[in-house]
Amino acid sequence: MEGIIDRFEGEIVIIEIDGHTQDVSKSLVDPAASPGDVVDLVNGKWVTNPEKTKNQSDRINRLAEELWEE
């Protein structure tokens, strides 16, 4: 399963999964994770996926550039 970290609220991490948000205990999320990171559920823990995070960031930057060009 894959998600994107939306935000942190105390000991809860809000992860967007398939367009819906899910509250996850911070203890189940990679401590190095940040909002916007793509995370994968591996053996019950959410771990960051640097390659997917970079691809997602690059895609968002391209879309933003296209918006400013118009």
Image (tube, rainbow, N blue to C red):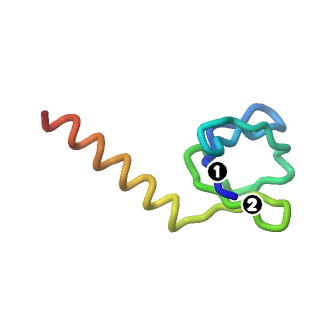
Please indicate whether residue 39 sits to the left or right of residue 65 in the image: right
The residue that appears at 60% across and 64% down in the rendered structure is: 49
Q: Quadrant of the C terminus?
A: top left
Look at label 2 and name its amino acid.
Answer: Leu
Specify the farthest residue to the front.
18
- Residue 2, x across and y down, in percent: 65, 56
Residue at which label 1 appears = 3
Query: Is mark 2 in CB contact (under 8 Å) with mark 1?
Result: yes
Q: Quadrant of residue 55?
A: bottom left
The residue that appears at 66% across and 53% down in the rendered structure is: 33
The residue that appears at 29% across and 44% down in the rendered structure is: 63
Of 20 and 56, the residue lying toward us: 20
Q: Quadrant of the N terminus?
A: bottom right
Residue at which label 2 appears = 41
Numbered mark located on residue 66 in the image: none
- Residue 46, x across and y down, in percent: 75, 57
Specify the farthest residue to the left.
70
Please indicate whether residue 13 sits to the left or right of residue 66 in the image: right
Whether 9 is drawn above or below 50: the answer is above
Q: Earlier in the sequence, mark 2 or mark 1?
A: 1
Task: Determine the CA span between mark 2 and mark 1.
Answer: 8 Å
Look at label 1 and name its amino acid.
Answer: Gly
- Residue 18, x across and y down, in percent: 61, 44
Please indicate whether residue 6 sits to the left or right of residue 69 in the image: right
Element carrying mark 2: strand
Whether 69 is drawn above or below 36: the answer is above
